[in-house]
Amino acid sequence: MNEAHSTAQNRPLARTSVNVFGRWWLLILTASMTLFFGLMQPNFLRANNLLGILSNACLAAIAGCGLTCVMATGEVDFSAGSAMTIAACTMSVLLDSRILNNYVGAMFVGILAATLMGAFNAFLHLTVGIPAFLATLSSSLVVKGIAYWITDGTTLYRVWDSDVYTYLGQHYLFGIFPMPFVVLVCVGAIILFLLEFTKLGKILFAIGSNQTACDYMGIQTKKYKLIAFIMSATMCGISGIIQASMSNGAGPNMAESYQLLAVMVTVMGGTFLKKGIFNVPGTLLAAVLVTLVTNGMIMMEASTWLKYTVEGLMMISSVIIVTLLRRQSERV
């Protein structure tokens, strides 16, 4: 009898431990990895290196903010890399060929190209009925083919005035803050506000929680999913513009690694603060963690297989923790 009573008392404690660890493990791991690489490589903690990590993390973070909107609805978007690519390549081709001799105009056309890709993803999923992960994977191949076509399969370097073209990727605001970080703060704040404090955000999360119930309540779930896919692709387009600016060029293979990386940081972010709910602060922290680990292993000259293994283990751990947190919240 006493043993049964003791076991019953221990269950809430175990659940609390899982809850606390699950919510904060991302922050704990980020701090631990920073300390580890700082001890192993003293140059790791230098200001220039940390600013470089922050700038590179912004690419995955901005794309991840967009994907958070889609994943809030219970869907997934595997087209981030292609959306980034088509935005950057469209802008660069317009400037290189002098079809549009205005950087801001070319930039907006590039982002528009990515936005149209998001609408196409929504069409395939919502109208044709293809599962979201297959629709986005398929469209990413189509768009990558278009990127090859408009660039003739080459990477376009220094296509315009370098000072203007590289401003968003290589310059600093007030000589302190990297411009990619400034853009991230702006778009991150917008997405955070929309998801946490508006009717749109509440509906997106409601759809992800129980779409059938939303349909019965008369909510136009297809319309809101369309908005989510468009927001995702637009954010990826902005990220692609910044990546082109950072490298002073664009090509059809420039953002291949972000196809999965953007999904990865979004899933990892779902373990931070909330009980398995995808959120912007978690996505941003996850992007910093992944970039930090990649940078640290490069500085330590770690093997490529180790880099991919570590990233895979982080992804698996995140999925497990998200699952545990959601199961726990369902029991409460």
Image: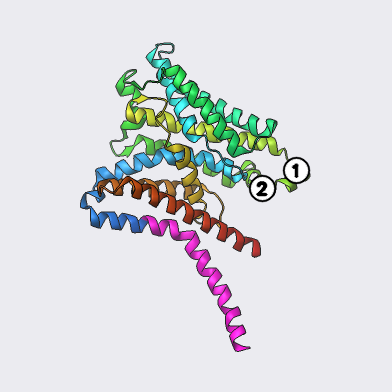
Q: CA distance from mark 2 to mark 1?
A: 11 Å
Q: Which residue is mark 1?
A: 215
Dot 2 or dot 1: first in sequence order is 2
Q: Which residue is mark 2?
A: 206
The extreme bottom residue here reads 1
- Position of residue 271 measured from the top left corner of the image (x, y, whole percent): 50, 55
Whether residue 95 is situated above or below residue 223 in the rendered picture: above
Q: Residue at x 30, y 35 (%)?
A: 174
Magenta highlight range: 1-30
Numbered label tally: 2
Quadrant hosting residue 228? top right
Which structural element holds mark 2? helix
Quadrant hosting residue 154? top left
Query: Which quadrant does the N terminus fall into?
Result: bottom right
Whether residue 27 is situated above or below residue 122 in the rendered picture: below
Whether residue 78 is situated above or below residue 44 in the rendered picture: above
User: Which label is found at residue 180?
Assistant: none
